[in-house]
Amino acid sequence: MKELQVNVKCPYCKKNIMDEDKTIDGYPSVRVIIQVGNKRGVLHLSSIYGSYNISSEINIPMDELVLFFCPYCDYSLITKNMCDKCSAPMTSFELINGGKVQICSKRGCKKHLIEFSNLTQEISEFYNVYSTSSAPLHKK
């Protein structure tokens, strides 16, 4: 099975939120600040598209709504888009090379998607980055 490792940035301050020091699934993780109830902490998400592996400073109960924030500008990453599986708000990250990744903000929901707004340009960039033999597409 092929894995797709994505590199993301904050859609607001545009800073890279990849954490080279904390790997999950063998790749740099996505570092965000989360809030669950009145508790805030750091969450690392797998950067493998479709992986649900995480490392969290705080406990996140199943089916709990999680608020996501940029670790640099502290802007909320929650969007107005609602999950079509569970109706929770979606969380959005920008792909460094163009496009967006969205994940559901409810713990346990597996809804996620990649979007391209400038389809021709962004898919071309995506293809150029991920189709070479040195890119992080590999068989497991």
Image (cartoon, helix red, strand yellow):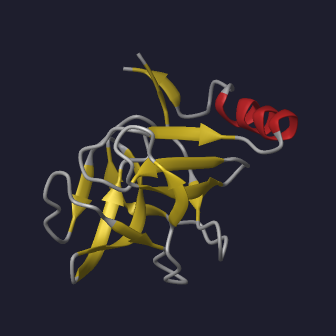
In the rendered image of this protein, does residue 32 appear above or below residue 119? below
Question: What residue is at 38 percent from the left and 37 percent from the top?
Answer: 85
Question: What residue is at 83 percent from the left and 43 percent from the top?
Answer: 118
In the rendered image of this protein, does residue 131 appear above or below residue 92? above
| Residue 87 on image: x %, y % | 39, 48
| Residue 44 on image: x %, y % | 33, 60
Q: Is residue 125 left or right of residue 21?
A: right
In the rendered image of this protein, does residue 57 appear above or below residue 60? below
| Residue 10 on image: x %, y % | 59, 67
Question: What residue is at 81 percent from the left and 36 percent from the top?
Answer: 119
Q: Quadrant of the N terminus?
A: top left
| Residue 26 on image: x %, y % | 35, 42
Give the camera-side residue of 138 and 70: 70
Give the camera-side residue of 23 and 74: 74
Q: How many marks?
A: 0
Q: Quadrant of the C terminus?
A: top left
Quadrant for residue 34, please give it. bottom left
Q: Is residue 113 left or right of residue 124?
A: left
Q: Is residue 39 left or right of residue 110?
A: left
Question: What residue is at 30 percent from the left and 42 percent from the top?
Answer: 109
Give the camera-side residue of 126 and 76: 76
In the rendered image of this protein, does residue 91 appear above or below residue 116? below
Quadrant for residue 21, please give it. bottom left
